[in-house]
Image (cartoon, rainbow, N blue to C red):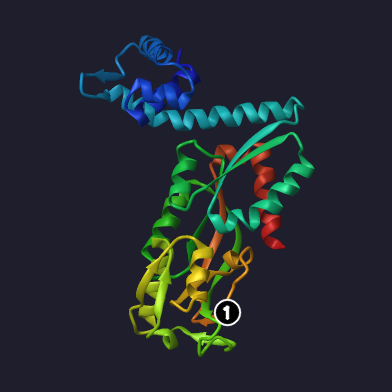
């Protein structure tokens, strides 16, 4: 009989490449990992690992078992949580992953409301941008992932994200428009609306590759290629660089809610560029009461 604890050990060994590294990840000893692997191999009746002096790799049977392990473990987690709720334990655990601007705006209100309504539910938070956050969800390293995708029909990464999310539960939260950020002394800083083409000769400050793709795409549609002189994923750093007069930038409105611009001004940019903010989870986990409650509170926080 295959036990869940043995599958967790196998997955850790496959991910890290050694018993000692897997032991460190799991918080146990190397002999314990070795012993559990021997028990698992005896249970399935075939070797799962090929050990040499240089490396350790999976056999074909090992690859099959690792491929199924994530779904099996997610299913077990869902079963345990549902049984606990039915039994009236009023307990639960939710591992949440969010991109930084979501962590500073949507997440605090959602988790505060969740704690007030369900004080026995424990929630942890880790920052990660998509697509990494989606990978963590599929790998069983989180239960809910806050993610985003842009609505440009010409964005290949958006189409890819939509297709990639097809097997997940997608809870739409809000549409987040990008705004222009200009130095307060800029010639257009006082304008109600700025057209992207009016910024063709500016020095630009760009962020992550997904955000940069949107900037480049929007500028190219306006007839120019932006000159990107500074690159940083840190929103306060972007605001600081703009405030110092070193360039202009696009930032999501959601990001501006938690940062006080200094020596910089936000302007509405046309044509509009938006990103869709969503909460993602696995179908099995969507039925877990604590996960469902977290999704509900995130939706309420986004509606405020």
x then y, percent, for residue 53: 20, 19
Q: How many residues crowd mark 1 within 10 Å: few (<14), some (14–19), many (20+)?
A: many
Q: Residue furthest front?
A: 244
Report whether 179 appears left or right of 89.
Answer: left
x then y, percent, for residue 63: 32, 28
x then y, percent, for residue 128: 49, 49
Residue under pointer 1: 265
Mark count: 1
- Establish if 152 lies above or below 114: below
Residue at horizontal 29 percent and vertical 19 percent from the top: 49
Q: Residue furthest left?
A: 53
- Establish if 221 lies above or below 19: below
Q: Nearer the viewer, residue 225 or 282?
A: 225
Quadrant in which residue 54 is drawn: top left
Quadrant in which residue 20 is drawn: top left
Q: Nearer the viewer, residue 241 or 24?
A: 241
Report whether 77 appears left or right of 245.
Answer: right
| Circle 1 SS class | strand
Report whether 264 appears left or right of 117.
Answer: left
Point out the image quarter for the C terminus.
bottom right
Report whether 4 appears left or right of 203.
Answer: right
Residue at horizontal 47 percent and vertical 53 percent from the top: 129
- Establish if 222 lies above or below 301: below
x then y, percent, for residue 205: 42, 71
Q: Nearer the viewer, residue 98 or 175?
A: 98
């Amino acid at each position: 009989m295959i036990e869940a604890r043995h599958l967790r050990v196998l997955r850790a060994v496959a991910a890290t490449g050694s018993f000692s590294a897997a032991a460190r990840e799991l918080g146990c000893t190397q002999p314990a990992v070795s012993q559990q692997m021997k028990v698992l191999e005896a249970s399935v009746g075939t070797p799962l690992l090929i050990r040499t002096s240089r490396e350790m790799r999976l056999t074909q049977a090992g690859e099959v078992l690792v491929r199924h392990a994530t779904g099996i473990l997610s299913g077990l987690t869902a079963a345990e949580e549902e049984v606990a709720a039915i039994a009236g334990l009023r307990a639960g655990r939710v591992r949440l992953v969010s991109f930084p601007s979501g962590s500073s705006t949507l997440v605090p209100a959602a988790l505060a409301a969740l704690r007030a309504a369900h004080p026995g539910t424990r929630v942890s938070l880790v920052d990660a941008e998509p697509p990494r956050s989606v990978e963590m969800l599929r790998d069983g390293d989180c239960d809910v992932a806050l993610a985003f995708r842009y609505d440009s029909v010409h964005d290949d990464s958006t189409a890819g994200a939509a297709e990639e999310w097809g097997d997940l539960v997608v809870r739409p939260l809000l549409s987040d428009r990008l705004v222009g950020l200009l130095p307060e002394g800029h010639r257009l800083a006082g304008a109600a609306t700025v057209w992207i083409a009016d910024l063709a000769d500016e020095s630009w400050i760009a962020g992550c590759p997904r955000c940069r793709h949107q900037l480049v795409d929007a500028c190219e549609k306006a007839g120019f290629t932006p000159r990107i002189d500074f690159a940083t994923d840190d929103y306060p750093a972007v605001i600081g660089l703009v405030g110092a007069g070193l360039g202009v930038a696009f930032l999501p409105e959601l990001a501006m809610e938690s940062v006080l611009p200094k020596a910089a001004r936000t302007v509405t940019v046309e044509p509009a560029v938006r990103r869709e903010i969503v909460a993602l989870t696995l179908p099995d986990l969507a039925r877990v009461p604590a996960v469902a409650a977290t999704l509900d509170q995130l939706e309420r926080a986004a509606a405020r």
